[in-house]
Image: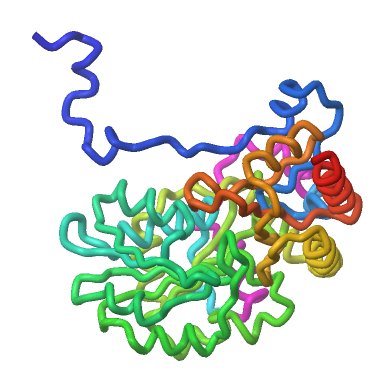
Amino acid sequence: MTSPRSRATLQVRPEVMDFSPYSAGLSIQEIKERYGLDTVVKLASNENPLGTSPLVQQVIRSHADHVFRYAQSGNPRLAQKIAAFFGLQTECVVTGNGSDEVIDLLIRAKARPGIDNIVAFNPCFSMYTVLARLCGVELRQTPLNDDFSFNWDALVSLTDDNTAIVFVTTPDNPSGYTPPVEEIMALAKRLPEQCLLVVDEAYMDFTGNRDAHSMMPRLADFPNVCVLRTFSKSFGLAGLRLGFGAMQPELAGYLKRIRPPFSVNILAEHAGMAAMDDTVFFNETLRVTAEGRDYLNRELAALGCTVYPSKANFIMFEAPIDGAELHEQLLRRGIILRPLNKGYGLPRHMRVTVGNAHENKVFINAFKEILNVR
C-alpha cells in the first residue's frame, strides 16, 4: 500500500527524479562565519567590478513604493529601450528573467521532447544541460580543443535533421576564448535548415571590439541565428535577473506567447532602462575591467601560471600547485575564486573574476603569500 507521503511523488518525471540541484559556491557570509573573517573578496561569479550604477540605485529607490503593482505584460517599454540601445527592431526582442529564461523558452518552443536534439560544446554553460534534460530533449556534446578553442567540424558533425538548436557561447566560459565573428557566420551557414544557432554573448561587452566578435549587428542577414544578452555583467544587475534574446520577429512572437506574463519584475524593468541610460558607469565598467584583466594577466604569468587569453571579465589560469589546495588557502584568507576541478575535470585550473584594483591586488598578494609559504 502506498504511504500518504509517497503518494505525492507518484509519477514524478524521471528527468526530475534524477536531477542533482545546482551547487552554488559558498556565500560571502558563509565564508566569514566558517573562517572567522571580517572581510571577504568575491572573485568567483563574474559580477560587475564596480557594483551597481548610482543611477540604477536611485531609480530603484524611487520606484520602491510601486512594487505592489504588476509590471506591464511583456515589458514593451523595456523592449523598445533595448532595441534602441542595441540597434534592433523592437519586434526582435524577447525579455526574460535573466537570459536563462530565454534559453528555457527557446528549448520549449523549438525542441520536441523525445524527437529532437540540441548540440553544444563540452564544457558549456550549465543551463543548456539542465534545461535540455528537464525538457526531455537529447543533448549532444563534443569536447573543446586542447587549447579551449572551438572544433567547428566536430560540432557540425553532431547535427542532423532533428537538431533543433546549436548553442555557442562567446566569449566562452570558463576559458574566455572568443572566436572571430566570421567563424560564427560560417557555422550558421553550415547548419541544417531547421536548426537555430543560439549565440550566447553574455560577456560580449568586455571584448573591446564587439563589432569584430558579435552576431548582434548581423542578425538581419542570418534568419537562423538568435543572440542572447544579459544585464548581470556589464550592467551590474545580477541580483535583479534580467536578460533578453534578439531573434527573427516570427520566432520572437512564438516565445512571447508562451512566456509567463510577469517574469520580469517591475524593479528589474526600471533598473534595466536606467542601466542603459548610465553610459558613464557602463563605460567605466569596461575600462576598469580591461585594466584589471591586463594586470591579472601579467601578475599570474609572473607567478608561474599558465594564463589563457580572455576577452571576458574573467581569466582562466592553470596554477603551479593543486587547485583544491589553492582554493582552500585563498578561502582562509577571505578570497573566493572558482575552482574548475568539479564539472570540468581540471584539477589545477581556476577562474578568477576581474575585480576592482584593490580586489585584484588583494588576490595577487594572497597568492604570492601562499606560494612563498610552500
Q: Main secondary structure of the magenta part?
A: helix
Check the image and tell me how it is coloured: rainbow
Image coordinates for residue 337, horizontal then vertical, percent: 69, 46
| Residue bounds of the magenta highlight | 59-87
Quarter placement of the C terminus: top right
Quarter placement of the N terminus: top left
Of 346 and 97, nearer the camera is: 346
Q: In this rendering, does residue 185 appear at all? A: yes
Above-or-below relation of 289 to 92: above
Q: In this rendering, does residue 79 appear at all? A: no
**Residue at horizontal 38%, vertical 53%?**
129
Of 47 and 339, nearer the camera is: 339
Of 297 and 262, nearer the camera is: 297
Seen in the image, is 56 located left or right of residue 67?
right
Considering every residue shown, the one lying at the far front of the view is: 374
Image coordinates for residue 235, horizontal then vertical, percent: 72, 59
Above-or-below relation of 224 to 236: below
